[in-house]
């Protein structure tokens, strides 16, 4: 499939600077652009590539001002990143096939129901009394236990496991190997030093438009619900413990862990490998840096935390730069001690 | 199902303060308690909720003294947490169905055996020469390789993979997606900078009453056995490398990693995201804090370690509080340097 | 099977010091050696065990000089570790069965092809238009999507998921539960605070001789390819984000995370739990310590980084030893301040 730059400009609401009859048939990264490809420039880190790219065209923002000659054709839009995203979406509609139908063998208990336009892959399993909406895709080797509700247009990728009593909204996506509703980690100590398991009788509730990453684990509540609110986006290998609440549109990057009963506000950004202790509350709009530990309530909205035991990022970095200079500080103290 | 407070008090060895004919039919979290529910109060962080809860009854410890009026009915027991756990267990027996029988298609090699009262879910796989005890539950999409032994009453959840020669005790639980006996990470460097795999010929031995969390990985030994002793409880997304030994009743929280050939003593508590290097020994009763690195032998029992390269938690926190004040310390040094 | 020490010495190019007709039938760890077993001593940490071992024989390096009497028989080779590895490989050939054939039910789309001498386990799934080489082993419950290419002799373990358009070389090994080609974590913010998914249209390319650990996740590129070059060895529970490039023969230990679009050079060693931010380049031959964060380009080859925000390991450890002494430094500053 080939498209003219004029067609693309129309799709993304942009303007071609040059020959709008040129044709492209591929999306290229700007640093790997070749004739027939279209790229975009948004992050200024990559600006140098636009002067060298062999891509036929590059989408740039309205205010981009080249400081060297260009051999590619520009399409200007209000926001290059958004424009390119629109193009990606259109392209995805063309190239990504939509799965439908049943592949056998698959297992679907007769007490469960599923809406129209579904896909049930081979070796997928649906237990008892499940109510599954329409246009739901269940990939091969996925497991859905008993009494699970799943809203319309939700995608359950290969090997996902969704345990009993989980409730899932519409337009969610569960990436391969994610586990929803496994038992929370609850054990009561016994006098002899051993532990007995505390039954985990609650469930997981996931609202609309949530994305759960590959091999991520979301445990069921001891009682009540572990709750992930609408629009939250969770990356790969994240651990969400029992009775955690994740606020609306909060984004959590890979390998982060949230301990039991903690409540994260809405519109938070939590970077990779962060660790948040149990039984605390994090205010809305909090940013938590990579590998940052959070050990107490964050009550003021809009802060950015960073550090081993995290606090204000500017203060941490100031101290960390002095940490690097500790040998020098020691020398200065020694010098002072030599004074009479 | 409804139960009177009198019936519940009898079950958990407690005493009703008020009307013991009141009925409850639900376990509620105290902060979400509603009429018809019974809650508990153990962690004092949650005390404020008892004065507001709409739960019909709350289980509290003998020595709880309310400092405001209550509108709920108290059931006093020696230990509120244990009392509630007992109640949870009784409730779990009532509501959790016990799986049994075979769902087809499933795969079970004719050279293997399994005891009475089993569950073998659809798409579960059991290889050659396995000896599986009675009352073992194997959920859908679980994989069990060759020459695996599994003791009575052990539960293998959906999508668990147990590789060849693994030996598992009684009353163990393997949460969804856990992998036991994958190859250890062993490669020998070659002169050209590449690596060749060192065959991993050992196995994994897991004793009785062990719990292994969701998507956790326990590698087989290079030779001999990776060993998890009885009563150990391991959370989600934990990495246990080849030839590691985990002591009795040791508890390891989510996302912790233990490197090869390290031996952890018994009754240790290891918090989330800790990292322990290879080829060391950790004494019994050691507590390792969240995100703490342990880089050398811990020979004295009963210590609590914390920090980036972990050591005594009190000492670390003292230094960390001064780390935060490094800019101020620098100013004080500058001030001193100004003196004649 | 029994072998004489003479036979073993010949296999590994070594020399028996003593009776070369003695027989062994087992590989033992030196600290657990028993009669009939053969062990090796390479890491000097374990030297004390050679004086106590009951193993019939121990493989040691040419230059090993015992400082106490020995009751075991030595086999000397140039390099004890390599000698033992050779022995392990020979033993593995004898004891590890090679899977072959088809177990039913399995799913294999008619538009796909697979070479000779394959294994396709029960409940394994191969989608459309895949081209799979010869001697490829696909274990039970593995999922392979559409348009996937897999080279000869590659092993796909139980429950591995390989998504559409992935290209895999020869002699690779994918350990259980690994996920290749799941969607990258890309969302564009919308004015109302919610996010829309950016389609992830690229793929994953994995060259020859790559090993991917248990439950590790390698995301597909937004555009272009996430690329793992030949000989790279990646451990368990590692996160490789979209558009990352991993260089030849680079080794990455468990629970490390590499953020999007970062490029790691060749022959790097990255220890466990390291975290590397996105959009940076790490030079060849870089060593990154355990739990180390890397936040900017590393342009000079051959460095060893360590620390919370990592830099030169020697400098970090110097500062960390002073961090431990901060209370003492404060006292010294106070003492200085008392001076007139």
Image (tube, coloured by chain):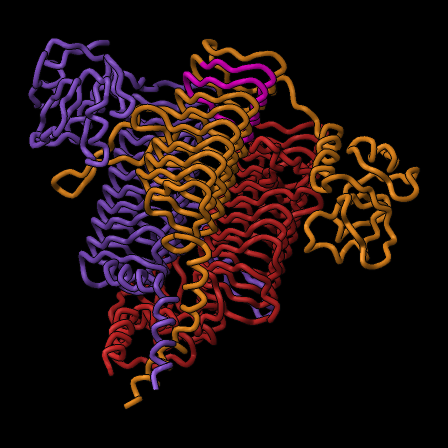
Chain colours: A orange, B purple, C red
Q: Does any portion of residue C88 appear in the rendered image? A: no
Q: Does any portion of residue A76 appear in the rendered image? A: yes
- Between A245 and C28, the residue placed more toward the observer is A245
- Between C13 and B196, the residue placed more toward the observer is B196
Residue B215's spot in the image, x, y percent?
Answer: 42, 39
Instruction: Residue at 71%, 46% (x, y): give it.
Output: C224
In magenta stretch: residue C271 = no
In magenta stretch: residue A144 = yes
Side of B6 where B43 appears, left or right: right
Assign the magenta stretch its main secondary structure. loop
Image quadrant holding the N terminus of chain A, namely: top right
Stretch of the chain drawn in magenta:
A130-158
Image quadrant holding the C terminus of chain A, namely: bottom left
Side of C250 where B259 appears, left or right: left
Q: Vertical placement of B241 versus A135: above or below?
A: below
Instruction: Residue at 34%, 56% (x, y): give it.
Output: B292
């Amino acid at each position: 499939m080939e498209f003219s730059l004029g067609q693309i400009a129309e799709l993304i609401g942009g303007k071609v600077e040059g020959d709008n009859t040129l044709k492209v048939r591929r999306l290229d990264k700007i640093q790997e652009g070749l004739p027939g490809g279209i790229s975009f420039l948004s992050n200024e880190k990559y600006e140098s590539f636009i002067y060298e790219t062999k891509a036929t065209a590059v989408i740039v923002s309205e205010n981009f001002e080249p400081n060297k000659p260009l051999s590619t054709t520009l399409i200007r839009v209000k926001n290059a990143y958004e424009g390119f995203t629109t193009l990606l979406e259109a392209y995805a509609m063309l190239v990504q096939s939509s799965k439908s139908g049943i592949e056998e063998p698959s297992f679907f208990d007769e007490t469960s129901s599923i809406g129209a336009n579904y896909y049930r892959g081979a070796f997928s399993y649906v237990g008892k009394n499940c109510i599954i909406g329409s246009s739901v895709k269940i990939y091969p080797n996925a497991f859905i236990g008993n009494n699970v509700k799943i809203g319309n247009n939700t995608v359950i990728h290969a090997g996902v496991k969704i345990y009993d009593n989980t409730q899932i909204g519409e337009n969610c996506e569960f990436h391969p190997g994610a586990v929803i509703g496994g038992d929370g980690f609850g054990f009561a100590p016994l006098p002899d030093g051993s532990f007995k398991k505390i039954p985990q009788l609650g469930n997981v509730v996931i609202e609309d438009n949530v994305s759960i990453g590959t091999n991520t684990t979301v445990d069921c509540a001891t009682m009540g619900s572990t709750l992930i609110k609408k629009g939250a986006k969770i990356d790969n290998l994240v651990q969400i413990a029992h009775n955690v609440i994740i606020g609306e549109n909060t984004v959590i990057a890979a390998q982060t862990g949230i301990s039991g009963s903690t409540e994260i506000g809405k519109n938070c950004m939590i970077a990779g490998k962060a660790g948040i202790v149990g039984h605390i509350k994090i205010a809305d709009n909090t940013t938590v840096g990579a590998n940052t530990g959070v050990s107490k309530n964050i009550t003021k909205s809009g802060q950015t935390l960073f550090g081993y035991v995290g606090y204000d990022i500017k203060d941490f970095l100031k101290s960390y730069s002095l940490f690097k200079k500790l040998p020098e500080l020691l020398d200065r103290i020694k010098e002072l001690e030599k004074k009479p």
